[in-house]
Amino acid sequence: MTLTLHVDGERWRAHLRGTAELYEGIIPVIKGNGYGFGNRTLARRADWLEVDTVAVGTYAELTDVLPRFGGDIHVLTPWRPFWSDTVRPERMYDPRVVHTVSRIEDLATLRDEAPEGTRIVIEGETAMARHGIDRHALTAAADALGRLRLIGFSIHLPLAENNLAEADRWAAAFEASKLAPAVPGTPLFTVSHLSDREVRALAERRPGLAVRPRVGTALWLGDRGAFRVTGLVIDSHVVERGERIGYRQRPLPAGGTVLIVSGGTSHGIGLEAPTAATTFKQRATSVAKGGLGAAGLALSPFVVGGKQRWFVEPPHMQASMILLPSGVAVPEVGEEVELEVRMTTTTFDAVDLP
């Protein structure tokens, strides 16, 4: 079974270079499934970009990134006492690792557990309301640092249009607190989900801070034209309307050809996150798709004859069954068909990256 990500290497590398130049001080984000490429590939690519710092999502991801990237590694998930169960102490407290602290109570425990001089950033609780210290607790955080080495501040912003205003408020709060004077040298201020223009505007407003943007999707996946995803046709059968096939023996709504193609749930095919619909049109579309799903109909990501085709039934672990209506040219067994997939939720059997 082969689900393959094909990459136009020259075009992708040009995009990476251009994005790194656009976002001054960029901190590439390497996490999850490595945006489809794998974290090991992205770690090596970040070294190629000659950046001095990358960010990973979790401590477990240090295992793949530390040996392949030579600079500092900022762990975005806040430090907790129980993370030591996920990675060996020598990796967790490698001198190149920068920890995020989002709770006052964790500072005392980290002081006792980590080597002296372990570098940290404090995270503020933004409108995301995910992790972070309230701005009124910044003084308490400064008083609890002890032998830890504070190098700056971190915020994780929502996907919104007013992020610059919130970022500036947090930068002002940090500079006015006891935290900024506790930093040896220029305080680091790392931010997510700001455009390159907003990053520059924030840096101009706050010349006393080293504003560094953390960038993931816009860097690795910003030029979707550089990617092509394919699966292989591994079998095909002519079927008639009403015929029962598949695990669930559902009657087919129309005759045509059933293709068995590589790519199933183990690759992330057919798996969906909760809807992010916010407008009436988006909600209506979501409701319509839900109604089709309740009727046993779901549109697959497989494109044949210029159109996405319907699943015959929910995808299997490593393959999917899709229905081609009568009159559509049937690809041969062994032929590639293209897919439209979400890269951050798809696991590929192979990545063709020249």
Image: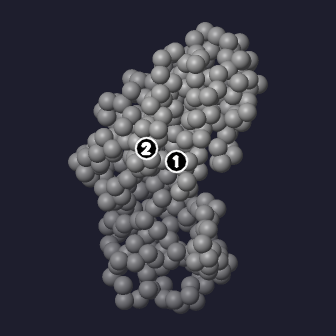
Q: Are marks 2 and 1 in contact (CB under 8 Å)?
A: yes
Q: Residue at x 41, y 24 (%)?
A: 71
Which residue corresponds to mark 1? 164
Q: Is residue 76 visible?
A: no
Q: Is the residue marked by circle 1 packed among few (<14), some (14-19), or many (20+) residues within 10 Å?
A: some
| Residue closer to the observer: 228 or 144 | 144
- Helix, strand or loop at disc 2? helix
Q: Residue at x 50, y 71 (%)?
A: 300
- 3D distance between C-alphas at marks 2 and 1: 8 Å
Q: Is residue 67 left or right of residue 12?
A: right
Q: Is residue 124 visible?
A: yes
Q: Is the residue marked by circle 2 packed among few (<14), some (14-19), or many (20+) residues within 10 Å?
A: few
Quarter in which the N terminus is drawn: bottom left
Q: Residue at x 52, y 15 (%)?
A: 184
Q: Is residue 275 left or right of residue 303?
A: right
Quarter in which the C terminus is drawn: top left
Residue most toward the right? 105
Coordinates of residue 171 in the picture (x, y in percent): 56, 35
Q: Is residue 94 above or below residue 201?
A: above
* Image disc number at residue 319: none
Q: Is residue 33 above or below residue 316?
A: above
Q: Quadrant of residue 151?
A: top right
Residue most toward the left? 10
Which residue corresponds to mark 2? 201
Coordinates of residue 350 in the picture (x, y in percent): 38, 49
Q: Quadrant of residue 59?
A: top right
How many numbered marks does the figure carry?
2
